[in-house]
């Protein structure tokens, strides 16, 4: 258990440092996903470059689209699943996207039915795992200190 606590403490501190360097962007996306009506707004990505999925022996199943956002001319990219692209109604020249008002450089693709993913969905895993690991530092630190304290008591009794 001591090793697990040390791993959680190390990961949490490292991720916290990365979030500080990136202005807490993943944490802000996670926070904004709880109230999408307030923080998300629609925009369009005008596609300049399309990169298809890799060869058949690769597990990559997403198209990458690079382009410029219509509202503020931000250069960005979005990855979209291959099965969505194969739909006949999908326009690959102008892709509807979601933007977040508290983060200017974050672009999220919307689902086909124009519904955003819930904060704890699989698609949002990159955004909810980060705060989870940061918050796990606190209980892991207390548990690690408790393990050290009980180890010292056991050593004093045997001496």
Image (tube, rainbow, N blue to C red):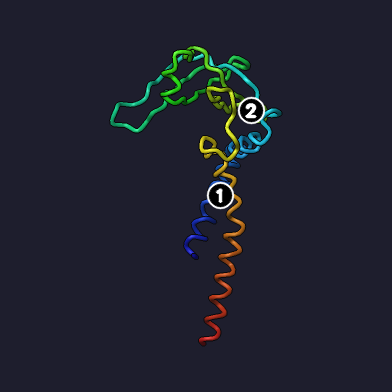
Image point (63%, 16%), residue name: 71
Image point (30%, 26%), residue name: 55
Residue 101 image position (x, y, % from top left):
67, 27
Return the residue found at the far bottom. Answer: 159
Residue 36 image position (x, y, % from top left):
66, 30
Q: For this view, does 11 lie left or right of residue 43?
A: left
Image point (65%, 38%), residue name: 31
- The alpha-carbon separation of the residues under discs 1 and 2 comes to 23 Å
Label number found at residue 133: 1
| On screen, residue 27 above or below 89 | below
Whichever of callouts 1 and 2 sits on the residue coming sooner in the sequence is: 2
The answer to which of 151 and 83 lies nearer the viewer is 83
The answer to which of 45 and 68 lies nearer the viewer is 45
Residue annotated with mark 2: 100
Residue 76 image position (x, y, % from top left):
52, 22
The answer to which of 98 and 25 lies nearer the viewer is 98
Q: Are marks 1 and 2 in contact (CB under 8 Å)?
A: no
Residue 35 image position (x, y, % from top left):
68, 33
| On screen, residue 145 above or below 104 | below
Identify the element where label 1 is drawn. helix
> How many circles with numbers are drawn on the protein?
2
Neighbour tally class for label 2: few under 14, some 14-19, many 20 plus, Cα within 10 Å: many
Identify the element where label 2 is drawn. strand
């Amino acid at each position: 258990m001591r090793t697990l606590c040390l791993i959680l403490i190390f990961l949490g501190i490292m991720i916290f440092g990365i979030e500080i360097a990136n202005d807490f962007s993943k944490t802000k996306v996670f926070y904004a996903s709880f109230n999408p009506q307030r923080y998300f707004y629609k925009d369009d990505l005008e596609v300049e470059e399309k990169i298809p999925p890799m060869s058949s022996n690769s597990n990559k199943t997403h198209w990458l689209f690079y382009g410029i956002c219509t509202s503020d001319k931000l250069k960005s990219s979005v990855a979209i699943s291959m099965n969505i692209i194969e739909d006949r109604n999908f326009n690959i020249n102008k892709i509807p996207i979601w933007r977040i008002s508290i983060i200017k450089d974050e672009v999220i693709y919307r689902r086909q039915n124009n519904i955003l993913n819930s904060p704890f969905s699989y698609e949002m895993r990159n955004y909810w795992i980060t705060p989870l690991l940061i918050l796990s530092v606190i209980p892991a630190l207390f548990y690690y200190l408790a393990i050290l304290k009980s180890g010292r008591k056991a050593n004093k009794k045997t001496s």
